[in-house]
Amino acid sequence: SLLLDNTGEYTKALLGGGRGSMKSSTASLGISAGLEHDEDACALVLRKVGDTLRGSVFEQMQWAIDVLGLGDHWRVTVSPMEIVNERTGQKIVFKGLDEPKKIKSTKFRKGYCKYIWYEEADEFAGMQEIRTINQSLMRGGSSFFVFYSYNPPKSQSNWVNRECLQPKANRLVHTSDYRRVPPAWLG
């Protein structure tokens, strides 16, 4: 609920955990709820490798929209891979970062990219790569929120593990696992 309340206390959330930890569910629900409350907002969902989108975050976002009972006004297309709100024109766009420079050309016909989600963030090269991408995307709006979901790497020297240890006022760092999730949610 902390991520869904839109208080502005946090602008970034690092969500670590393994299978069943609800990190992807938290990000997708947060984005879906946020889009419902801000008709100028759009979202971009990113993975390092593009051909992993369809079976993961694309399905996850559809699940979140359905869970929140919003499916009646969102249209899903595979080519291009996006989910469009038919009432407002808002979009959720999915991209792989096989070629990061292509992100600079991401445009939204209506609104701006308020939500960015890096799924499997530990697969990215590091915060410098992510900062460059964020600088290209975070423009034209009044507020932004970035989700980073990842499986905590075993190596403590991995950039994600180091980043989580650096406290920042506008950032939530949360780690969970399947033991903290109601059993009925795990399937």
Image: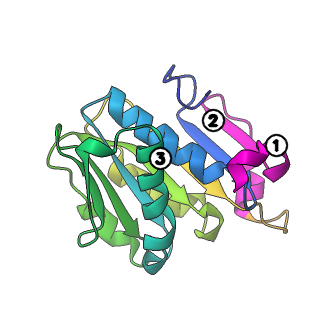
Where in the figure is residue 114, as x and y percent of width and height? 36, 40
Determine the residue positioned at 23% across, 63% down.
Answer: 105
Task: Give the spatial CA distance, label 1 vs label 3.
Answer: 20 Å
Q: Which residue is mark 3?
A: 64
Mark 3 or mark 2, which is nearer the start of the sequence? 3
Determine the residue positioned at 34% across, 50% down.
Answer: 137
Where in the figure is residue 113, as x and y percent of width and height? 32, 45
Mark 3 or mark 1, which is nearer the start of the sequence? 3
Q: Which residue is mark 2?
A: 171
Height in image: 115 above or below 52?
Answer: above
**Amino acid type indicated by mark 2:** Arg
Q: Which residues are magenta?
A: 159-187
Q: Which residue is mark 1?
A: 180
Q: Residues within 10 Å of mark 1 (few under 14, many from 20)?
A: few
Residue 162 seen by the camera? yes
Element at label 2: strand
Where in the figure is residue 87, as x and y percent of width and height? 16, 38
For this rendering, which residue is in front, 121 or 131? 121
**Amino acid type indicated by mark 1:** Arg
Task: Give the spatial CA distance, label 2 vs label 3.
Answer: 23 Å
Mark identifier at residue 93? none
For the C terminus, which image quadrant? Answer: bottom right
In the shown orientation, is residue 137 left or right of residue 77?
A: right
